[in-house]
Image (tube, rainbow, N blue to C red):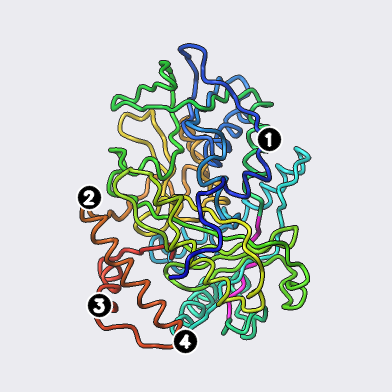
Amino acid sequence: MPTPTVSPGSEPAWWLRDADDGDRSPPPPGDLAVDVAIVGGGFTGLWTALELKERDPSLRVALFEAEFCGFGPSGRNGGFCHGYWSYLPTLRELFGDEQALDLCRAGDLIVPGIRAFLERRGEDAWLREGGMLEVSTTPRHDAAVDAHVEAARAVGRPEEAVLRERPGISRRFRRAVFFRDGATVHPARLVRALRRAALDAGVEVHERSPARLRRDGSLTAAGREIAAREVVLATNAWATDWRPIRGRLTVFGSYVVLTEPVPELLDEIGWTGGEAITDSRMFLHYFRTLDDGRVLMGSGSGPIGYGNRIDRRFTHDAPTAGRAELGLRRLLPALQEARIEASWGGPIDVAADHVPFIGTAPGGRVHYAMGYSGHGVGPSWLAARALASLALRADDEWTRLPLVHRRTATVPPEPLRRLGGGAIRAAILACEEAEEAGRRPPPAARAVAAVPRLLGMRLGQR
């Protein structure tokens, strides 16, 4: 595996360096009593806080973030923002056609909702609604493209997954499926805009305030007692070993590299429509352009965590950053000479079936949304509405989403999760790398890579 040009972890994510204004809110000065306490200052926590205040401005809502708003995946992700049409084959398997369509229709509200927020606030988060392509780069991946097209036709919505036999942009792309609901954003600009809006709405934001949720549902933050009628847990990967959801999440690392601005090269290859792109691998590549002509290439092939331990493997793993850079050069050969200027990584919380779950812990006071599986920028907008309804004890269209109170598959306990998942990850990577090189994967790797499917589980970001 080649060494990346820029070592990940040497600097904060480029998004944050570009957007962070340095403003921080202090920890609570003393014990607090609030209506709703939110733990986590990323997209889920901030959208939930804003939704609660919009529904009832008199509510006392406090948000607690261990570092600063946007420090976690909300400030490090690829900035893909879309709903659920690209998940339709999986949703049909999990929920049946009717509920799958309900979720896709709810997902259609996401991008307009984010657009309306930005316009209302006069904020620029580089929202670009160019659609999304999933491309096939090997013969085996053609079937994945076809499955999307067939699923959309089967539910009477063929316009939501349109086959492109000649997608262009790269000679490596055999064919593609186009989803019109795809968009991209500058995630750190969006999360900082949300923080400003939350403060303006009267949300009490406390950064550098690590929170601890006790088994009885009581809460401390920065050493202060927090009395809250309702609690929303929005910590994603950091909640992997929390007892009410234990066994329902695995943490993976995801890494990106970012080029210098290359607008002239993008013009040459015809990548000017702002399309977000993924390939059809299990450990997918995801790539997009930025408003200033840079190209971001990500690899969801990072290491697997152990329990709830978030450590350097999620921020400093050079081999995964190297795979992202190799993916850039291989998938976009016209960018062979583009200089890499930044590289970073972060943890993602992956559900066993790759679809998030929203619910309430035993006791009825603590609500959560987890398992975004690398697809959280848009769905966090949706989850926040469901979380606000749960906290307000409402029975409405948001609490009736199929993501809420759903049964989910589980993953093995530790250490089997780490050891078994690591072996399967290595086997899948070996198979995918062999296929991309035009070789037949080793039989042993093929056998091990098939285990998740046999158990009804998905690994990676597919």
Residue type marked 3: Ala
Between the residue at mark 1 and the residue at mark 4, the CA separation in whole angstroms equals: 47 Å
Residue 346 % position (x, y):
47, 50
Q: Earlier in the sequence, mark 2 or mark 3?
A: 2
Structural crowding at the residue carrying mark 2, measured as other residues with C-alpha within 10 Å and reported as few (<14), some (14–19) or many (≥20): few
- Answer yes or no: is residue 238 visible: yes
Disc 2 versus disc 3: distance between alpha carbons?
22 Å
Q: Disc 4 or 3, which lies upstream in sequence? A: 4
- Mark 3: secondary structure: helix
Instruction: Tell me the tag on residue 447.
Output: 3
Residue 21: mark in rendering: 1
Q: Earlier in the sequence, mark 3 or mark 1?
A: 1
Q: Where is residue 366 drawn, in percent x and y? A: 39, 31
Indicate which label's residue lies in the foreground, 1 or 2: 1
* In front: label 3 or label 1: 1
Q: Residues within 10 Å of mark 4 (few under 14, many from 20)?
A: few
Image quadrant in which the N terminus is located: bottom left
Q: CA distance from mark 1 to mark 2?
A: 40 Å
| Highlighted range, magenta | 175-184
Residue at numbered disc 4:
139
What's the residue type where badge 2 is placed?
Answer: Glu
Please give the label number shown on residue 414: 2
The type of residue carrying mark 4 is Pro
| Label 4 SS | helix
Placement of 327 over or under 381, stated as above or below: below
Tell me the amino acid under the disc marked 1: Asp
- Dot 1 or dot 4: first in sequence order is 1
Residue 181: tell me if it is visible: no
